[in-house]
């Protein structure tokens, strides 16, 4: 699972949380506790810091998210009909 998480790092990926959705670069680190992500995007004013323990992380070849935290990172745009949305 850790190798799949690390493979998503350093590439353009979509951030989605509630009504927010925009692309950026995910800088991912892992350790015994879980996953930490620094997400940078030209569509958001600051970098975002995301994290999740291993017991709440879910991952596939194109998705990374944390249950109960509300964020997800996807290779493809999760809701193409919304496009880039940075309004809360």
Image (cartoon, rainbow, N blue to C red):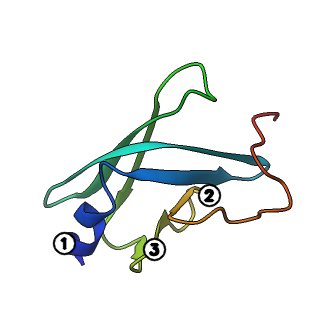
Q: Label 3: which residue?
A: 62
Task: Give the image location of residue 80, x and y in percent.
Answer: 77, 62
Closer-to-camera residue (18/56) = 18
The residue lying at 79 percent from left, 49 percent from top is 19
Residue shown at 65% from the left, 62% from the top: 77
Secondary element at image label 2? loop
Badge 3 vs badge 2, beta-carbon distance below 8 Å? no
Between 55 and 8, the residue placed more toward the observer is 8
Q: Earlier in the sequence, mark 3 or mark 2?
A: 3
Q: Is residue 51 left or right of residue 81?
A: left
Q: Of the numbered discs in the image, which one, if any, rests on residue 70? A: 2
Image quarter for residue 59?
A: bottom left
Q: CA distance from mark 2 to mark 1?
A: 22 Å
**The N terminus lies in quadrant:** bottom left
- Vertical relation: 14 (above or below) 88: below
* Badge 3: residue crowd in 10 Å (few <14, some 14–19, many ≥20): some
Point out the tag, 2 or 1, that comes first from the N-terminus.
1
Farthest residue, direction left: 32
Q: Secondary structure at mark 1?
A: helix
Of callouts 3 and 1, the N-terminal one: 1
Coordinates of residue 66 in the picture (x, y in percent)? 48, 64
Location of residue 31 (image quadrant): bottom left
């Amino acid at each position: 699972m850790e190798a799949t998480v690390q493979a998503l790092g350093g590439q353009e990926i979509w951030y989605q949380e509630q009504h927010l959705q925009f692309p950026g670069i995910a800088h991912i680190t892992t350790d015994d506790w879980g996953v930490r992500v620094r997400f940078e995007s030209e569509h958001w004013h600051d970098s975002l810091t995301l994290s999740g323990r291993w017991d709440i992380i879910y991952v596939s070849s194109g998705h990374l998210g944390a249950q109960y935290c509300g964020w997800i990172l996807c290779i493809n745009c999760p809701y193409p009909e919304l496009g880039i949305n940075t309004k809360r």
